[in-house]
Image (cartoon, rainbow, N blue to C red):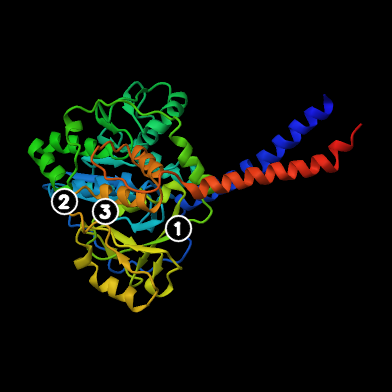
Amino acid sequence: MKKGFMRFVLYLSLFLLFVGGVGAFGAVRSRADWISVRNISSPSFQGVKIPKYDPTKPTVAVVLGNPITEVFDFLVPYEMFAMTDEFNVYAVAPENKVAALTGGLDLIPHFSFEEMDGLLGKSPDLIVVPYMPMDDEGKYRPVRQWIQKHGKTKILSICSGSSNLADAGLLKGKTSTIHWRIVNQVTKTYPDTNWMRDQRFVQAGNITSSAGLTSGIDAVLYVISQQLGESAAVKIAKEMHYPSYHYVNNPKVEPYYIDKTEAIYYMNLAFQFQKKQVGVLLYEGMEESALASIFDTYSPLGTAKVFTISNSEGVITTKHDLNLVARYQVSNAPKIKRLLVPGTEAPTLSTYASQSWNEQDRGVQPEYIHSHKPDRFVFDATLEDLAKQEDLLTAKWAAKRLEYRPDHLELEGELFAWEAFITALMLGVGALLTGYLIDRRFLSKWV
């Protein structure tokens, strides 16, 4: 009986060491890639473009955290409000220095908090709060304080940005929503808020909160409809080719839960050791949402590591005047498997940058991932590409993570993430063989 117990402990310990230990290492490494911040020198700020302030227009301030901000949560609302041409839209941060978005995208804010306050002399008319990790209290504190300072103005939180509002004490006694994966977590952490799981957005007093990622599009459209009229919101949705406008009028949905579909995510996160090295070419005039579709589809899944590349060290200005800074230039780019050029007009707008890349003769041709589907929502192309590059289960989970619920996606590819499965299987077999050898060498000799 004692020997049997010792065998059980031996095999279990080795399995946990081989499979659990290696898997935990892989997951930590993948997480580090997702929230990496710039550790290389930044170029000078020459060429930074700041949209002209028009005192006759309401001002929307989209917040950047310190040290990092969720990429979709920031880029997509910024673009949508700027598309209306009816708001002053600015990126604001604790300091006027290079800020990081998740997945490895960097940009320079238009104003620091102090500069924004000085320009307006009052609160912005609307503050957009993306999800900003709060792990580093020293760096995050100025963000919390600025949100609290302007807590009585209109606020729109995107995805898990409502956890930042709860942290600031702005959701006490109110109803809110948040990304479906952390509803249970915030219910325990902030029990004085009524957290809704079955709404894509919730309006409560001066605060509009949205659920997972693409739910933020519905919330932005709702706010636009309230500020400018529904025709303006419909116009923006059509320009984006967004297929789910009906949620703006009826945000109630069948809720998502953490279930067996999570398995593919954790398999990829833990056991995809041969991550695909993917470059994203930055160029003048690129669409913000197309860029977000790359970084929030490929980067968080544990299957790819994404690098920003430009043809020079200068600032790259997007279609609506965001100032991007690439981590690599064409001349010193790391070895990559693919070079994605996002945007429906990429073949035309990126000509100079693409030519600079081709002149390097790296053996990797630019891929214009959105231009062949200009009449579709940008996330359609990236999700369909993900299915072909990885597998169907990974693409379906990515859509679920994005809270994207279309039935029209044309997903084609392998059914399963074989690489991750085989890696886990080999580790399990290795644990069993090691246990068998130890058993034969030591335990079997016990009398």
Quarter placement of the N terminus: top right
Q: What is the three-letter code of the residue carrying label 1?
A: Lys
The x and y percentages for residue 81 are: 19, 46
Task: Judge whether 424 appears above or below 179 on screen.
Answer: below
The x and y percentages for residue 110 are: 28, 56
Question: Which-is-in-front pick, marks 3 and 1?
Answer: 1
- Where is residue 314, by image quadrant? bottom left
Q: Mark 3 falls on what kind of element?
A: helix
Q: Horizontal placement of 444 versus 344: left or right?
A: right
Q: CA distance from mark 3 to mark 1?
A: 20 Å
Q: Horizontal placement of 387 versus 275: left or right?
A: left
The x and y percentages for residue 118 are: 27, 50
Residue drawn 79% across the image and 28% down it: 4
Q: CA distance from mark 3 to mark 2?
A: 13 Å
Q: Which residue position holds label 2?
A: 375
Name of the residue lying farthest toward the right = 447
Residue drawn 34% across the image and 42% down it: 130
The x and y percentages for residue 445 are: 89, 37
Q: What is the three-letter code of the residue carrying label 2?
A: Asp
Question: Mark 1 packing: few (<14 Cα in 10 Å), some, or many (20+)?
Answer: some
Q: Earlier in the sequence, mark 3 or mark 1?
A: 1
Question: Mark 3 packing: few (<14 Cα in 10 Å), some, or many (20+)?
Answer: many
Question: Which-is-in-front pick, marks 3 and 2?
Answer: 2
Q: Which residue position holds label 1?
A: 276
Q: Which residue position holds label 3?
A: 290
Q: Nearer the viewer, residue 388 or 232?
A: 388
Q: Mark 2 falls on what kind of element?
A: loop
